[in-house]
Image (cartoon, rainbow, N blue to C red):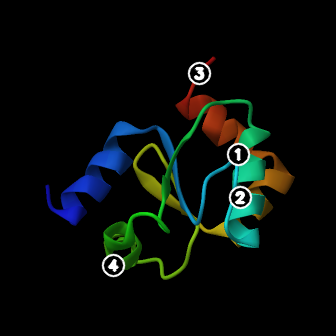
Amino acid sequence: MEVEDRIKDHVENNKVILFMKGTPQMPMCGFSSRTSAALKECEREFAYVNVIQDSEVRERLPAYSDWPTFPQLFIDGELVGGCDIVMEMHESGDLKRMVQAAVPA
């Protein structure tokens, strides 16, 4: 499967997915750490892709999403944004509402 198809498959088949450096249990950068921590506080499961381990995704995702940096959060197939946007949404309560709407209890 081509890398673009793998990215599309991840985005389309996971209601909430975070493309990050490292894992939620062991983030490899501060931005990924803060973003995954905010998602954990939403009290719903989310998927992730460790772009450190998958260099093809790391190289191609910015062109796919038209977003240059990591992490990148997608909800319901749409790019939400990176760390700054996610943190703003977390502080306002919008992130939790969006995640819980996408992944009902």
Under mark 2, the amino acid is: Thr
Q: Secondary structure at mark 4?
A: helix
Residue located beneath label 3 in the image: 104
What percent of the width, then of the height, locates residue 30? 76, 70
Is residue 92 visible in the rendered structure shown here? yes
Give the mark toward the camera: 4 or 3: 4
Q: Are marks 1 and 2 in contact (CB under 8 Å)?
A: yes
What percent of the width, then of the height, locates residue 32? 67, 64
**Residue at horizontal 69 percent and vertical 60 percent from the top:** 27
Q: How far separated are the C-alphas under marks 4 and 3? A: 31 Å
Q: Is residue 63 left or right of residue 22?
A: left
Under mark 1, the amino acid is: Leu
Give the mark toward the camera: 1 or 3: 1
Residue pushed farthest bottom? 68
- Local crowd at mark 3 within 10 Å, few (<14), some, or many (≥20)? few
Q: Is residue 37 above or below residue 62?
A: above
Under mark 4, the amino acid is: Ala
